[in-house]
Image (cartoon, rainbow, N blue to C red):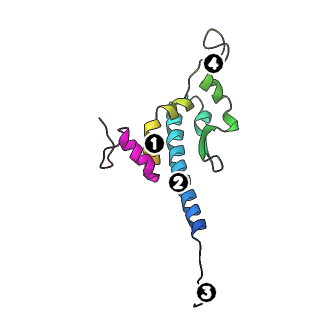
Amino acid sequence: MSNDNKNYKSNIPKVKYALTEIEMACFKEIGQLVKNVARDKCKHLTGRLFININYQIRKKEKSVRLGLKRKAFYGMYYEFGTKKGGSNGGGITKQPFLTPAVLENIDRIRLIAGKYFKEIEKENIEIGLLTNDGEKDDS
């Protein structure tokens, strides 16, 4: 029996790295989408709220978080309203812009994810977001 020394080189680290990069690219595109939509929906009084809407990619949790930087903490009063409510009560009426940016764009988020992950693309075809030839179904 021959005692040939064969070297085995694992590609697992490269594959893990590639998958992480794909996830991060997907999360970045989704984050940009919801950030831009939220900016379009927010109240533009001074511009501070607008420029402080941002997203954060959370690698460990494998998620994207949409929110406000500290300088615009008051944006949450617009998102959820205040206890006293609007004009007569002296408070702020609920005028959400973050939540709708996500909820009104679930289909677009799925389409973005489908570009990066084929299993999601297959599900998008099954639920009618895409046609079998990969085109967006606008019907």
In primary-sequence order, the first of circles 3 and 2 is 3
In primary-sequence order, the first of circles 4 and 2 is 2
The secondary structure type at the circle numbered 3 is: loop
Whether residue 22 is in magenta: the answer is no
At label 3, counting other C-alpha atoms closer than 10 Å, the crowd grade (few under 14, some 14-19, many 20 or more) is few
C-alpha separation, residue under disc 1 versus residue under disc 3 = 48 Å
Q: Amino acid at mark 3?
A: Asn
Q: Which residues are magenta?
A: 116-135
Residue highlighted by disc 1? 110
Is 103 placed above or below 61 here?
A: above
Numbered badge on residue 25: 2
Residue highlighted by disc 4? 92
Whether residue 124 is in magenta: the answer is yes
Between 100 and 6, the one lying in front of the other is 6
C-alpha separation, residue under disc 3 versus residue under disc 2 = 40 Å
The secondary structure type at the circle numbered 1 is: helix
Q: Quadrant of the N terminus?
A: bottom right
Extreme-top residue of the structure: 88
In primary-sequence order, the first of circles 2 and 1 is 2
Q: Position of residue 62 (x, y in %)?
A: 60, 47
In primary-sequence order, the first of circles 1 and 3 is 3
Q: Amino acid at mark 4?
A: Ile
Extreme-right residue of the structure: 70
C-alpha separation, residue under disc 4 versus residue under disc 1 = 33 Å
- Give the mark count: 4
Q: Position of residue 10 (x, y in %)?
A: 59, 72
Q: Position of residue 73 (x, y in %)?
A: 68, 32
Residue highlighted by disc 3? 5
At label 1, counting other C-alpha atoms closer than 10 Å, the crowd grade (few under 14, some 14-19, many 20 or more) is some
Residue at 55% across / 30% down in the picture?
A: 99
Q: Amino acid at mark 1?
A: Arg
